Image (cartoon, rainbow, N blue to C red):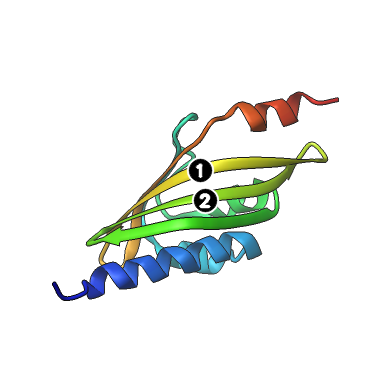
Amino acid sequence: MAPDGRAEANDELVRDFMAAWERRDTGFILDCLTEDAVYHSVPLTPIVKGRHRRVGETVRRRAAGRLEVRHQVASGDVVMNERTDLITRNGGPVTLPICGVFEMQEGRIRAWREYFDLTPAKAAYEQT
């Protein structure tokens, strides 16, 4: 079976998107999203609906850190990755294993869902 060029392009875009989150490149992040994109950290309510200024606010609020992609697969317009986000919350390190699902539309991210256990992040907020 021949490689799916669309899947390869989507895979590369998601990798570049993850790198943009690390470096806080709001312009690149916005360019990767469709106008009606949804970002949803599944233990919480959807954070961003649509490509607008709230994305920039979300980027700035997010703790700086490293997003280490362990595995990533792409098929057509779906990209999934398993990664570890290494961030700082309340002055201490937090390690979050995450599964991310990206639905693509015409070379942009239409939906981004993250599945993870909220317990490590909540524990960091509760530290004194």
How many marks do you count on the picture? 2
Q: Which residue is labeled 2 in the image? A: 83
Query: Which x, y percent locates residue 20?
Result: 56, 65
Query: Which x, y percent locates residue 58?
Result: 58, 48
- How far apart in space, not on screen, are marks 2 and 1 (Cα)? 5 Å
Compared to 89, does 18 lie above or below? below
Q: Characterize the local packing of mark 2: few (<14), some (14-19) or many (20 or more) Cα atoms within 10 angstroms.
A: some
Q: Which residue is labeled 1 in the image? A: 98
Q: In percent of the image, x 44 and y 67: which residue is there? A: 31
Query: Which x, y percent locates residue 107?
Result: 30, 68
Q: In percent of the image, x 42 and y 53: which residue is there? A: 81
Horizontal relation, residue 49 to residue 60: left or right: left
Horizontal relation, residue 93 to residue 99: left or right: right
Horizontal relation, residue 48 to residue 22: left or right: left
Depth order, front residue of 93/103: 93
Marks 2/1 in contact by CB < 8 Å: the verdict is yes
Pick the quarter of the image with the N terminus.
bottom left
Horizontal relation, residue 100 to residue 36: left or right: right
